[in-house]
């Protein structure tokens, strides 16, 4: 039987947070990447490490959308739902497409699980007639897994834990894959525990062959490899891309890298990644709090390293004062904010874009600081590279905005060639300034940037600090005219960066028309797919996603002027739109806002555009 | 640079000193400049990092590298500099508010990590720069602008706080004792690890005389115990008193009633005795206050770092990852 060929498939793996759905998802993703599909993923898990088992709060999900053409989002709805228990079904069934495929593990629907998921324990939830809208496969995955392991000397709990491998094996079979990448992964992961290695491999294969034996061939689908631009590709998550981007920037600038951070979701993985490379020349420092982290990074920059710090919203609040110190000192500093949802602790594992105005204005005094936002997991690499470049070349703190969705989401990423990245040139003292008798720490170049003179440099001893500086000499000054001038210079210095930025591009659609959708951050996929669909319907719409928010690229004005109406979708209450309205008072901006801790759906964007098109 | 080539003056910057005339900070500044010259340090390899406060103005007056940062954070900034620059001689200058109140967290973690820096705590038992509020080291019942009916809080036992945090070097001196201060500054600088030196500093504007018991020569004799390694713990108007251990309890005795061997001979490397000195002697009214190097131990070496640069091959492998594929 030949499998039906499809353009794309979206799958959601949903189970209890102890069921290993994240691992299943990431392994399926790696396999998909190697197979050559384009894809986008969306992990969604509870904040608690061991959330109450079996309940809705404990549901952990992983969504992947893969295809033979360009994939921009994990999909508003999915074609396949794997529900490992009743709570997962309750949580996710609403987004399963009609006629989609529902796979359940019977063992997750016993009386206890029904009760925990607040179903009536006496009812037969899995009765076929309830799911007549869908293709429905019931499998007793737990007992099949245990059965496969009856020869292996592990306790029942450990055996039960391997059931996610069954699911993985079955789905890999369904999409015509081989098991190589997962087998390699299991070999390495359980190198030191031969029993667990054997068990996982066995259950994986049991799942893989189950499709054949249970005659599920009719569900097999083929999704051909996507036609990506030639090059070397890998699967990458946003936080990893961020870490690699910072490392690459330090390398290109020939600087030591010092990254200081205090653990916080969803930024911690950047620290974890960088900590791995301690022996290769990356210094990471787990500080006692976020203030110490940013301060240590400033100390490192003072000494001539690339000082970087990363956190999420609550940590940003703590760093404000020190970021301002870096602004006054005019030292390079990279500040990474992986945004999460809500004020205070909010919803740590959910995503939002509501720190933009905080990044822009959340400090005392007039405090202009460049802001750069990544717009996809892979783009975190380039965006943070640029953030470092600007920090180093313009002697300024730079805020890099990512978010939970980008941080944990993944996509195929074309590995960058170091040659293709712009050079990064630290502003060291010029030969002629080195000769000069009197050293003037706040003397500036044409870009209004002072030079980076590090302790240890002979005859250039100087003192810097947070007090207002006298123009050029850098001595403390309270003179009214001087303060005015210095305030103006600090603003002008950031404004001048616009001249150095790459031009803003249009991602989809024509260069002019009726509606431009302008987004930033994680909204890329939803906007782009909505716009592409409308373009097919011959609508006059285009899409631009901006990386550089402060300052805006110079050509942005021209782009905006070429459209009648501009739609600004944001996962906040309207933050970029406020900045746009101030910068471009003559354009017509329309807001589309959502604050639910989850990304936009394509359909939401599409509706808003249609509405504007009238 | 040859030892002794620079003089104290070479370590003075061209900035006008802005402390109130008579402030204890002047004397400390002078001793620090003298010691740096004496020890043959170079100007460019020396860095002073401070927070905010009167005391934290210090770096401006040093012809070295310096940073006057933000309130309480000097220890954190110095940590980042220390970890990336092994070559520099790094000093932290801080006040009692700066590092025992707002920056308390950074102080204890610096000491725990035992990074090689010299921390000078200018303790005037008051917030000087903000014009006289009580600090976490102010004496009970002290009347200040923010405690008009007398300070209701207990003061930190400064040395005990640092000992608890695992400090590897704990010392105390006072602005008015130039020679002692100089000697202790030298030892502070020589110790490898976080050296904590508390300097009693008179703020004669907002808390004048708070250390009179230790600065006034006749009162000092009764109230201060100057520790020296290898010497007995003696004090008193005519040096007639000594501290002796009775089991684990310290007690004051008449020196002449005991032979030298029977007295308590100071050994700054003895952790148990340091604990008794710090927790039992220094904290109690019926004993004199400790001056000198109270405790010193070899560097813990809890964190070692060799700053390095990434190699191109390492980076290229990392960028590619272990599961890449080629699209032709
Ligand atoms: C974040 C912050 N809070 C408060 C202040 C105000 N402030 C400046 S110095 C200071 C206290 C200084 O006392 P101390 O550290 O003992 O130094 P001293 O002036 O006594 O030498 C305070 C509260 C500040 N500069 N920054
Ligand atoms: S207020 Fe006190 S501590 Fe500050 S400069 Fe004057 S005397 Fe010195
Ligand atoms: Mg003080």
Image (cartoon, grey):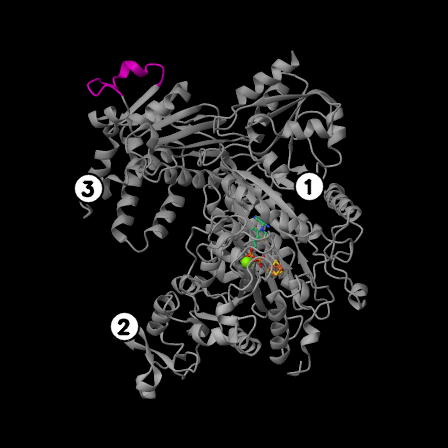
Disc 2 CB within 8 Å of nearest ligand 3 atom: no
Q: CA distance from mark 1 to mark 3?
A: 63 Å
Q: Nearer the viewer, mark 3 or mark 2?
A: 2
Check the residue under mark 3 and report the chain it is in: A
Quadrant of residue A192 in the image?
bottom left
Q: Earlier in the sequence, mark 1 or mark 3?
A: 3
In the rendered image, residue B295, in percent from the top left (x then y), is placed at: 42, 73
The C terminus of chain A appears in which quarter of the rendering? top right
> What residue lies at 68% left-to-right and 79% top-to-bottom?
B6
Residue A306 appears in which quarter of the rendering?
bottom right
Whether the residue carrying mark 3 lies under 8 Å from ligand 1 is answered with no
Q: Residues within 10 Å of mark 3 (few under 14, many from 20)?
A: few
Q: Marks 2 and 1: same chain?
A: no
Q: Which residue is mark 1?
A: A366
Residue A6 against residue A188 in the figure, above or below: above
Q: Are marks 3 and 2 in contact (CB under 8 Å)?
A: no
Q: Give the vertical position of B92 relative to A129 (above or below).
A: below
- Residue to which mark 2 is pinned: B248
Give SS at disc 1. loop
**Image coordinates for residue A487, horizontal then vertical, percent:** 74, 44
Q: Position of residue A190 (x, y in %)?
A: 32, 51
Q: Which portion, as a residue range, is magenta?
A: A119-134
């Amino acid at each position: 039987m030949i499998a039906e060929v499809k353009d794309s498939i979206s799958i959601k793996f949903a189970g209890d947070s102890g069921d290993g759905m994240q691992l299943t998802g990431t392994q399926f993703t790696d396999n998909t990447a190697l197979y050559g599909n384009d894809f986008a993923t969306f992990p969604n898990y509870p904040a608690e490490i061991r959330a109450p088992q079996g309940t809705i709060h404990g549901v952990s999900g992983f969504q992947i959308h893969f295809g033979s053409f360009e994939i921009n989002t994990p999909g508003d709805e999915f074609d396949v739902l794997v529900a490992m228990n009743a709570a997962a079904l309750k949580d996710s069934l609403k987004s399963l497409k009609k006629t989609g495929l529902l796979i359940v593990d019977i063992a997750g629907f016993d009386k206890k699980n029904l009760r925990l998921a607040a179903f009536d324990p006496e009812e037969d939830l899995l009765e076929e007639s309830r799911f007549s809208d869908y293709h429905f496969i019931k499998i007793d995955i737990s007992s099949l897994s245990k059965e496969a392991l009856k020869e292996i000397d592990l306790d029942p709990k450990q055996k039960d834990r391997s059931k996610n491998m069954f699911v993985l094996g079955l789905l890999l079979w369904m999409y015509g894959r081989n098991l190589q990448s997962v087998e390699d992964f299991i070999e390495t992961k359980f190198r030191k525990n031969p029993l667990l290695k054997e068990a996982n491999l066995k259950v994986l294969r049991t799942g893989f062959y189950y499709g054949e034996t249970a005659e599920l061939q009719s569900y097999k689908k083929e999704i051909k490899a996507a036609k990506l631009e030639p090059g070397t590709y890998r699967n990458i998550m946003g936080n990893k891309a961020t870490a690699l981007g910072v490392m690459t920037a330090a390398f290109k600038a020939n600087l030591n890298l010092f990254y200081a951070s205090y653990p916080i979701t969803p930024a911690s993985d950047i620290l974890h990644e960088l900590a791995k490379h301690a022996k290769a020349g990356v210094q990471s420092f787990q500080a006692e709090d976020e203030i110490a982290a940013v301060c240590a990074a400033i100390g490192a920059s003072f000494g001539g390293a690339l000082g970087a710090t990363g956190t999420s919203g609550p940590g940003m609040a703590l760093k404000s004062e020190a970021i301002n110190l870096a602004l006054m000192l005019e030292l390079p500093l990279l500040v990474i904010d992986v945004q999460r949802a809500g004020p205070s602790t909010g919803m740590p594992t959910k995503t939002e874009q509501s720190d933009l105005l905080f990044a822009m204005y959340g400090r005392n005094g007039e405090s202009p600081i460049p802001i750069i936002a990544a717009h996809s997991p892979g783009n975190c690499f380039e965006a943070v590279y640029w953030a470092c470049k600007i920090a180093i070349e313009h002697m300024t703190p730079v805020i890099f905005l990512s978010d939970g969705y980008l941080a944990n989401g993944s996509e195929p990423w074309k590995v960058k060639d170091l040659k293709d990245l712009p050079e990064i040139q630290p502003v060291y003292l010029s030969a002629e300034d080195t000769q000069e008798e009197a050293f003037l720490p706040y003397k500036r170049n044409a870009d209004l940037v002072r030079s980076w003179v590090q302790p240890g440099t002979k005859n250039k001893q100087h003192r810097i600090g947070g007090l207002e500086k006298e123009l050029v000499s850098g001595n403390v000054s309270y003179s009214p005219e001087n303060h005015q001038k210095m305030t103006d210079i600090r603003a002008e210095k950031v404004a001048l960066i616009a001249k150095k930025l790459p031009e803003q591009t249009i991602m989809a659609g024509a260069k002019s028309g009726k509606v431009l959708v302008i987004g930033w951050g994680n909204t890329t996929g939803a906007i782009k797919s909505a716009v592409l669909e409308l373009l097919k319907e011959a609508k006059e719409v285009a899409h631009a996603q901006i990386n550089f928010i402060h300052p805006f690229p110079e050509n942005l004005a021209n782009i905006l002027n070429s459209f009648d109406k501009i739609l600004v979708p944001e996962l906040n209450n309207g933050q970029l739109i406020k900045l746009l309205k101030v910068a471009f008072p003559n354009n017509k901006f329309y807001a589309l806002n959502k604050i639910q801790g989850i990304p936009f759906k394509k359909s939401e964007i599409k509706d808003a555009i249609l509405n504007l098109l009238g | 640079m040859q030892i002794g080539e620079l003089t104290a003056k070479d370590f003075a910057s061209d900035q006008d000193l802005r402390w109130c005339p008579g402030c204890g900070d002047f004397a400390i500044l002078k001793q620090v400049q003298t010691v740096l010259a004496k020890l043959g340090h170079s100007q460019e390899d020396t860095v002073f990092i401070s927070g905010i406060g009167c005391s934290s103005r210090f770096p401006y007056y040093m012809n070295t590298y310096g940073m006057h940062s933000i309130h309480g954070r000097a220890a954190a900034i110095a940590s980042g500099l220390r970890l990336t620059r092994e070559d520099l001689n790094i000093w932290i200058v801080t006040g009692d508010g700066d590092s025992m109140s707002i920056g308390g967290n950074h102080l204890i973690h610096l000491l725990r990590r035992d990074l090689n820096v010299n921390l000078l705590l200018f303790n005037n038992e008051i917030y000087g720069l903000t014009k006289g509020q009580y600090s976490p080291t102010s004496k009970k019942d002290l009347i200040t602008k923010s405690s008009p009916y007398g300070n209701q809080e207990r003061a930190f036992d400064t040395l005990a706080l640092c000992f608890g945090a695992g400090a590897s070097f704990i010392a105390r001196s006072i602005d008015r004792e130039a020679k002692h201060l100089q000697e202790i500054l030298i030892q502070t600088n020589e110790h490898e690890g976080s050296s904590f030196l508390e300097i009693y500093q008179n703020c004669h504007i907002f808390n004048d005389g708070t250390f009179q018991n230790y600065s006034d020569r006749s009162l000092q004799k009764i109230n201060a115990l100057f520790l020296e390694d290898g010497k007995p713990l003696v004090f008193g108007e005519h040096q007639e008193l000594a501290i002796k251990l009775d089991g684990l309890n310290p007690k004051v005795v008449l020196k002449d009633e005991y032979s030298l061997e029977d007295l308590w001979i100071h050994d700054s490397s003895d952790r148990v005795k340091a604990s008794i000195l710090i927790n039992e002697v220094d904290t109690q009214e019926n004993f004199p206050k400790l001056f000198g190097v109270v405790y010193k131990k070899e560097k813990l070496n809890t964190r070692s770092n060799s700053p390095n640069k990434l190699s191109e091959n390492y980076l290229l492998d990392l960028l590619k990852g272990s599961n890449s594929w080629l699209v032709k």
